Image (cartoon, rainbow, N blue to C red):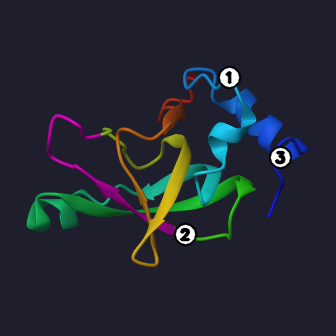
């Protein structure tokens, strides 16, 4: 696992211009940081559950944590829904809870590229 100040953390900062960080130590609380392309936005599960869905993705660039292919997104179908869709590229900042990775709107998650290829 990278140590704060190492190159992988600095590279993650380049991908997150709209999630400003003033210290690398702000990344320490996250167990997973990666640039991913979404393959399934988990909306079907969220419709049944009304609060969370499982995002499935392929990792384009891993910055921290173990490689995974899914993460729980909270607050779907609410005013805090991140609006993540299949085909988009996102920089995800995941935290562990109950042994599973989770993201939510209050984390630093940011869309990097939309489905038409436009980079943010």
Among the 4 quarters of the image, the one containing residue 21: top right
Query: At which x and y percent is residue 1?
Result: 80, 64
Residue 64 vertical position relative to residue 117 in the rendered view, above or below: below
Which residue, given by chain and number where applicable, does mark 1 sit on? 22
Residues at discs 1 and 2 in contact (Cβ within 8 Å): no
Number of marks in the image? Answer: 3
**Residue drawn at (21%, 67%), measured in percent from left and top?**
45
Residue 68 vertical position relative to residue 12 in the rendered view, above or below: below
Give the alpha-carbon distance from disc 1 to disc 2, as whole Å: 29 Å
Query: At which x and y percent is residue 92?
Result: 54, 47
Give the number of the mark in front: 3 or 2.
Answer: 3
Q: Which SS class for mark 1?
A: loop
Mark 3 or 2, nearer chain start: 3
Residue 8 is marked as 3
Q: How would you rate the neighbour count of disc 3 (Cα within 10 Å): few for under 14, some for 14-19, many for 20 or more?
A: some
Which residue, given by chain and number where applicable, does mark 2 sit on? 69
Residue 21 vertical position relative to residue 51 in the rendered view, above or below: above
**Residue drawn at (27%, 62%), measured in percent from left and top?**
53
Q: Which SS class for mark 3?
A: helix
């Amino acid at each position: 696992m990278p140590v704060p100040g190492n190159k992988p953390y600095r590279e993650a900062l380049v991908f997150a211009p709209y999630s400003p960080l003033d210290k690398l130590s702000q990344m320490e609380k996250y167990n997973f940081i990666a640039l991913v392309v979404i393959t399934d936005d988990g909306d079907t599960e969220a419709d049944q559950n009304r609060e969370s869905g499982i995002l499935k993705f392929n990792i384009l660039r891993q910055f921290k944590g173990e490689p995974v292919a899914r993460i729980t997104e909270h607050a779907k179908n609410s005013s805090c829904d991140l609006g993540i869709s299949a085909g988009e590229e996102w920089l995800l900042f995941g935290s562990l809870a109950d042994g599973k990775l989770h993201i939510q709107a209050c984390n630093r998650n940011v869309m990097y590229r939309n489905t038409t290829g436009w980079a943010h």
